[in-house]
Image: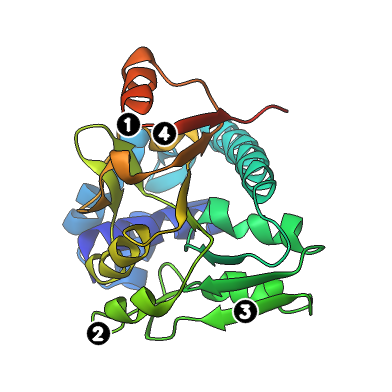
Amino acid sequence: MLKTKRIQQIQEYVFEHQSVSLEDLGTVFGVSKTTIRRDIQKLIKEGMIQKVYGGVAINHAKFESFNERKARNQFQKRLIAKTATDYVENGDVIFIDSGTTTLEMITFLKNKQVTIITNNLDIIIQALPFENLTVISTGGLLERDTKSFSSYSHADSFKKYNFDKVFMASTGVSILNGVTNSSPIESGMKETIVKGNADVFLLIDHTKLDKYAMVTYCGLEEVDYLITDDFLDKSYQDYAKENNIELIVTKE
């Protein structure tokens, strides 16, 4: 088991059980107490978990704060998605990228006549009840972490689609590194889609700014509309003006 994945699973296990002993964690995850101590040290530093006699427990104050932030972020993502769907017109053929913000678009598209092409399983499922939404799946290998389909061999097949608009997600965005993603396989598909003739909408909440992931799938200058939930600093505003990017900040 990869270390980072194990640490994530340890956190989820502690959250579920409230408090656990180091011995129990070692048994459940099949590693030594020394390894468990090393893993939980990272979680303790983040403040989500605290040491107790013989083991670890949830830091309730931090956990509640985390849940409040998560709820707040979800509300902001819905606002971003709602703003994005205002640009969708009946009859449009659109691509909706895999992401927690782009997923929220389906709620606001349910009364429109639109063809949606997507690589995301959750988007397909959410669109299922609405017969006015024609859904085309990209197919390929299902990546369970992101619930998205991807394939190196399928990237070029997107050149045949005449999208009106594409709505993209990102793990992190910066002027220097551009628009980034964690999956190399998925990034090839994203790159092909962005380089088409459609208007490119990038949907990101403020937590994604000045961050970057493993793979850059397009430069920030390739984006036509950047929709976010907070005003960007002067460097982004100047960059947007120089590259004809329309900055859209959501309003509650």
Q: Nearer the viewer, residue 135 or 241?
A: 241
Mark pair 4, 1: CA separation: 6 Å
Residue designated by label 1: 243
Quadrant for the N terminus, please. bottom left
Residue designated by label 3: 135
Residue 239, how many percent across, how many down?
Answer: 31, 24
> What's under tag 3, amino acid-wise?
Val
> What's under tag 1, amino acid-wise?
Asn
Local secondary structure at mark 1: loop
Residue 204, how many percent across, how many down?
Answer: 47, 41
Residue drawn at the location 70% of the way across and 57% of the way down: 89
4 vs 2, front mark: 4
Residue designated by label 2: 153
Mark pair 2, 3: CA separation: 21 Å
Mark pair 4, 2: CA separation: 31 Å
> What's under tag 2, amino acid-wise?
Ser
Residue designated by label 4: 245
Sooner in the amino-acid sequence: mark 1 or mark 2? 2
1 vs 3, front mark: 1
